[in-house]
Image (tube, rainbow, N blue to C red):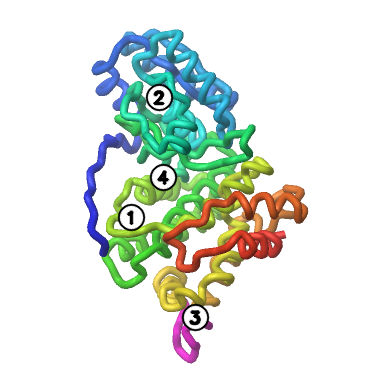
Amino acid sequence: MNDFMYSYPVKVYFGTDAAKKAISQELGKYGKHVMLAYGGGSVKKSGVYDAVRGMLEDAGKEIVDFSGIMPNPTYAKVQEGADLAREKQIDFILAVGGGSVIDCCKIISAQAKTEKDIWEMEFTDHEYPTEFIPMGAVVTASGTGAEMNNGAVITHEEKKIKTGVMGANAVFAALDPAYTMTLPIKQVISGAFDTLSHCMETYFGSPRTANVSDEINEAVMRNVIRNLWLLAENPEDTYARRELMWDSAMAENGILKIGKITDFQAHMIEHQLGAYTDCNHGCGLAVIHPVLYRHIYKEAVERFAHFAECVWSVSPVGKTRDEVALEGIRQLEDFIRAIGLPTNFRELGIQTDDKLLKAVAESSNIQAGCCKTLTPEEIFEILQECQ
């Protein structure tokens, strides 16, 4: 393992009535003006909005709504939220939703406390925010693990860039699996695949020799796969949802990344695909992962073979290491298809051509942790194969 320093700032309330427990125990530490941030109408239709608003009222808070946070949140939406937070002198931001809502609020939290443009500050001046409006998260759609860290994926529409921006950590996260029952099952499954992707992107980073972080990761990946099978068979399986919700948190709370340089090349490619097409994140990853892995496995064949054996139970008997590795990638692709996720861009429902794919490839961030340093030309070939 590499050298590391580890600390963990997010207090987690998990299980039944997690939001009620968190709000009653945590909000008393902050001022009375609370921004209640959420996405579309689903939190209102499900009753989650009314329930959380009632909890805030019981805590004596004055509530300012900030709605309409979209999937793949935009930088313009961040600025809208920051302006509102300044105007209303917000003391605390409560994000109610999935990764998009939480990510947007992380950057609102930072932008509202500085006159500098956060995008220019981070990507031009290479400075990072140090002051934030405190925030918490009530998770209604798990998979991204956004509640567990301070990274946010934001789309700058003018620049055609979708990338990670650093913002606030939530001071607490409420994870009640019952809240995921209101979502369409495909959304739950695509979110859980994002969890599996986070695990794989960490696992295939370096070092790729045996280490405790990766052995924990193998257990988490097996758990995600097992519970995704259960949920695909029975969407009402509450135990599977509980397991997947904690898997999501484990994938992004730093535990699996201890001593690792992570990969995240598939994410970087998908982010730029999303910047140009606004496709579903988990579904985009489902298309890209097997194709990417077939292109790079020879650069880390032993790690891919070990992944096949330990995660997919591929027998090595009578097979070369290349054959074992490729069988693991094939099983990953078969699994994606079996749980109802797309395996190409046509099934994903997006229109692509060479011009668009070249733009995606040329703007994708090349990741140092990947076992092969890809060129834009190689990324273009991968994207073409994804069609």
Visible residue check, residue 110 = yes
Which residue is at a point 57% across and 47% down the rendered structure image?
Answer: 271
Kindly check if marks 4 and 1 are in contact, taking CB atoms under 8 A apart as contact: no
Q: Residue 210: name its quadrant.
A: bottom left
The local secondary structure at tag 2 comes to helix
Query: Counting residues from the N terminus, which is met first, the one under dot 4 or under dot 3?
Result: 4
Please tell me whether mark 1 sits on a helix, a strand or a loop: loop
Q: Of 95 and 266, which appears nearest the observer?
A: 266
Q: Are marks 3 and 1 in contact (CB under 8 Å)?
A: no
Q: Residue furthest bottom?
A: 318
Foreground label between 3 and 1:
1
Position in image of residue 97 (x %, y %): 48, 31
Left or right of 16: which side holds 48? right
Q: CA distance from mark 2 to mark 1?
A: 25 Å
Q: Can residue 226 be seen in the rendering of this structure?
A: no
How far, Cα to Cα, is label 4 from label 1? Answer: 18 Å
Answer above or below: position of 377 versus 32.
below
Q: Residue at x 26, y 64 (%)?
A: 1
The residue to which callout 1 is attached is: 257
Q: Sequence order check: which comes first, mark 2 or mark 1?
A: 2
Residue that numbered label 2 is attached to? 109
Q: Find residue 294 and report its image quarter.
A: bottom right
Find residue 245 and name its label: 4
The kind of secondary structure element at disc 4 is: helix
**Dominant secondary structure of the residues highlighted in magenta in the image:** loop
Amino acid identity at mark 1: Lys
